[in-house]
């Protein structure tokens, strides 16, 4: 794998993460009394974005299969965007619709948690690969 591939994949992941942060922020602002987990998830994605920026700045990552890990992260971010997009509503929507969306959000929480746990695992893998590449690169 070429460095350009990892850099391009990291750039795509960064864009997905940015979309996800914006979407989470929008949903948090629309739901009065939104659970604190929503803000924690937003912060977690922002922190993760900083790691991705580090990957873009690294000179050599070939031979460490980092591209596949980045793609797995991107898939998770894409899935989370799908989940959070399904929870969004317009301010003009009727109260019943807003209530239904809140209930749907509660129903989606286990899936969201599972995605964030997997993202944490992959983040650890990325950190290990980055450290190894810097040690031996």
Image (cartoon, rainbow, N blue to C red):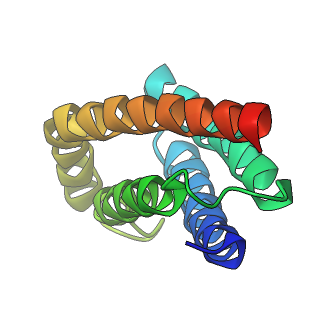
Answer yes or no: is residue 34 visible: no
State the image quarter where residue 15 is shown.
bottom right
* Closer-to-camera residue (63/125): 63
Answer yes or no: is residue 26 visible: yes
Look at the image and tell me in which quarter the C terminus lies: top right
* Closer-to-camera residue (91/8): 8
x, y (%) of residue 12? Answer: 60, 74
Compared with 98, 50 (above or below) is above
- Residue at x-position 53% and y-position 54%: 66
x, y (%) of residue 100? Answer: 17, 52
State the image quarter where residue 16 is shown.
bottom right
* Closer-to-camera residue (60/121): 60
- Residue at x-position 44% and y-position 52%: 69
View extreme (front): residue? 136
Look at the image and tell me in which quarter the N terminus lies: bottom right
Compared with 61, 11 (above or below) is below
Question: On the rendered structure, is 86 left or right of 37?
Answer: left
User: Exactly how many numbered labels are in the figure?
Assistant: 0
Compared with 26, 34 (above or below) is above
x, y (%) of residue 129? Answer: 58, 38
- Residue at x-position 49% and y-position 51%: 27
Question: On the rendered structure, is 96 left or right of 42?
Answer: left
View extreme (top): residue? 36
x, y (%) of residue 8? Answer: 66, 77
State the image quarter where residue 46 is shown.
top right
- Residue at x-position 43% and y-position 38%: 122
Question: On the rendered structure, is 118 left or right of 133?
Answer: left
């Amino acid at each position: 794998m070429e460095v350009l591939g990892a850099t391009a994949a990291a750039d795509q992941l960064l864009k997905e993460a940015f979309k996800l942060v914006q979407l989470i922020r929008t949903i948090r602002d629309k739901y009065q009394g939104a659970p604190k987990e929503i803000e924690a998830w937003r912060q977690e994605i922002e922190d993760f974005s900083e790691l991705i920026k580090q990957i873009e700045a690294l000179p050599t990552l070939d031979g460490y299969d980092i591209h596949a890990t980045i793609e797995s992260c991107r898939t998770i971010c894409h899935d989370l965007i799908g989940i959070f997009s399904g929870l969004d509503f317009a301010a003009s929507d009727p109260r019943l619709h807003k209530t239904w969306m809140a209930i749907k959000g509660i129903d989606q929480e286990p899936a969201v948690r599972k995605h964030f746990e997997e993202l944490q695992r992959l983040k650890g893998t990325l950190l290990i690969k980055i450290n190894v590449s810097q040690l031996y690169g």
